[in-house]
Image (cartoon, rainbow, N blue to C red):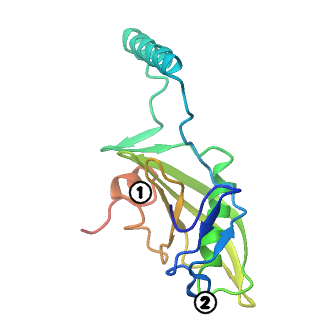
């Protein structure tokens, strides 16, 4: 489970590191994260699906088609066009993340503001997005952002916090270069 985020209507136990006052209590989160969990497939359907995948790969290789190539590539990282629903998903994950921060009270987060960057390095997905923030009676706008998100295979999106304004280290450098956020990062 990632940072206490789970699909609705499951009930989870609040981890102590997220909210010491609520540690061990069961609660239901009203978040519907962006989720690509594999479906349960019967043995026959799995074989049929396998044959379809093999046929599609063979057709792509035989045709030499590059139409399905990723938008930008750098090393083993690729920048991918973000689907329209990703912004709302990341906002829901970010609101859940902020709800568990001890110094954030009466938070109001909207957005995303500007472009949502999405990419993949190896098997992990990375995203950067900025949100308008208003909490504790003060308007912060997009200060110290963008927010960093990661999704590893078999898990949901996880908010890693903001960048502090410095994008280096927020995602693999090859991906930041592919997104055209930086030309290079210091070692």
Disc assigned to residue 176: 1
Disc assigned to residue 89: none
Q: Are marks 1 and 2 in contact (CB under 8 Å)?
A: no
Q: Is residue 46 above or below residue 104?
A: above
Does dot 2 land on a helix, a strand or a loop?
Answer: loop
Residue 115 sits in quarter = bottom right
Does dot 1 land on a helix, a strand or a loop?
Answer: helix
Name the residue: 68% across, 71% down.
27
From the viewer's perspective, tell me whether residue 88 is left or right of residue 123: right
Among numbered discs 1 and 2, the one appearing first in the sequence: 2
Name the residue: 66% across, 58% down.
10
Quick one: label 1, few (<14), some, or many (20+) residues within 10 Å? many
Residue 37 sits in quarter = top right
Q: Is residue 139 above or below residue 152?
A: below
**Residue 170 rendering spot, x and y as whole percentages:** 42, 66
From the viewer's perspective, tell me whether residue 117 is left or right of residue 98: left
Closest to the camera, between mark 1 and mark 2, is 2
Residue that protrudes farthest toward the left in the picture: 187
**Residue 150 rendering spot, x and y as whole percentages:** 47, 58
Quadrant containing the C terminus is bottom left
Q: Is residue 71 above or below residue 16?
A: above
**Residue 45 rendering spot, x and y as whole percentages:** 53, 19
For label 2, the residue is 103
Quick one: label 2, few (<14), some, or many (20+) residues within 10 Å? few
Q: Nearer the viewer, residue 102 or 87?
A: 102
**Residue 116 rendering spot, x and y as whole percentages:** 59, 55
Q: Is residue 111 above or below residue 165?
A: above
Name the residue: 73% across, 63% down.
30
Residue at mark 1 to residue at mark 2: CA–CA distance: 30 Å
């Amino acid at each position: 489970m990632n940072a206490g985020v789970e699909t609705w209507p499951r009930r989870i136990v609040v981890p102590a590191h997220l909210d010491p006052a609520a540690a061990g209590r069961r609660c239901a989160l009203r978040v519907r994260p962006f989720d690509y969990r594999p479906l349960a497939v019967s043995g026959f359907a799995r074989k049929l699906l396998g044959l379809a995948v093999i046929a599609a790969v063979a057709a792509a290789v035989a045709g030499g088609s590059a139409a399905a190539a990723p938008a930008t590539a750098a090393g083993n990282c690729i920048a991918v066009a973000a689907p329209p629903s990703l912004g709302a998903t990341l906002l829901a994950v970010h609101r859940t993340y902020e709800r568990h921060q001890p110094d954030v009270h009466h938070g109001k987060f909207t957005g995303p503001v500007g472009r949502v960057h999405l990419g993949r390095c190896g098997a992990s997905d990375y995203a950067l997005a900025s949100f308008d923030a208003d909490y504790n009676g003060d308007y912060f706008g997009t200060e110290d952002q963008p927010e960093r998100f990661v999704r590893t295979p078999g898990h949901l999106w996880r908010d890693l916090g903001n960048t502090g304004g410095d994008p280096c280290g927020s995602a693999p450098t090859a991906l930041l270069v592919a997104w055209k956020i930086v030309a290079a990062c210091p070692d």
